Image (tube, rainbow, N blue to C red):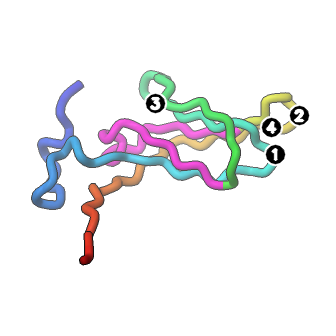
């Protein structure tokens, strides 16, 4: 995979590997599972059970640039229709530096 981050200017002082990408999903109360796939090759990044109304999942950092993610919610018993959205772009998380006060 090419190094996509070489063309991006990030906050100075942090190595590009310190950054992370997340997808935040507001889930339906009837959903039991969230899935995240790469739209280009259908590689699966997440298939997780849901325990909270908002789920945050990490994905590869190159998905902060393009919108090639598919995100879906579904129930495990097949009663409700699944909901799938494509064209999702991840959010970037900048590194957190702790501030220690004396």
Q: Position of residue 86 (x, y in %)?
A: 54, 41
Q: Secondary structure at mark 4?
A: loop
User: Can you say whether 19 is above or below 42 in the image?
Assistant: below
User: Can you say whether 56 is above or below 44 in the image?
Assistant: below
Mark closest to the chain's N terminus, 4 or 3: 3
Among the 4 quarters of the image, the one containing residue 38? top left
Residues tagged 1 and 2 counted as in contact (Cβ below 8 A): yes
Residue at image point 64% right, 38% down: 34
The one of 49 and 92 positioned closer to us in this rendering: 49
Mark closest to the chain's N terminus, 1 or 2: 1
Q: Secondary structure at mark 3?
A: strand
Q: Is residue 76 left or right of residue 90?
A: right
Q: Is residue 36 left or right of residue 7?
A: right
Task: Tell me where the magenta segment starts and ends, as one range.
Answer: 54-73
| Disc number placed over residue 38 in the picture, else none | 3
Q: Position of residue 50 (x, y in %)?
A: 68, 42
The one of 64 and 41 positioned closer to us in this rendering: 64
Separation (CA) of disc 3 from disc 2 = 26 Å
Separation (CA) of disc 4 from disc 1 = 10 Å
Q: Is residue 71 magenta?
A: yes
Residues tagged 3 and 2 counted as in contact (Cβ below 8 A): no
Mark closest to the chain's N terminus, 4 or 1: 1
Q: Which residue is mark 4?
A: 81
The one of 71 and 101 positioned closer to us in this rendering: 101
Q: Secondary structure at mark 2?
A: loop
User: Can you say whether 89 is above or below 10 in the image?
Assistant: above
Q: Is residue 68 magenta?
A: yes
Instruction: Single out the residue that lies furthest toward the front.
Output: 102
Q: Which residue is mark 2?
A: 79
Q: Which residue is mark 1?
A: 30
């Amino acid at each position: 995979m090419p190094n996509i981050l070489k063309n991006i200017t990030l906050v100075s002082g942090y190595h590009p590997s310190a950054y992370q990408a997340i997808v935040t999903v507001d889930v339906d109360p009837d959903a039991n599972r969230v899935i995240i796939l790469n739209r280009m090759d259908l590689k699966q990044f997440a298939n997780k059970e849901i325990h909270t109304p908002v789920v945050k999942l990490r994905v590869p950092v190159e998905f902060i640039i393009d919108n090639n993610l598919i995100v879906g919610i579904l129930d495990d018993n097949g009663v409700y229709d699944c909901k799938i959205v494509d064209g999702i772009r991840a959010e970037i998380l900048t590194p957190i530096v702790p501030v220690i006060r004396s």
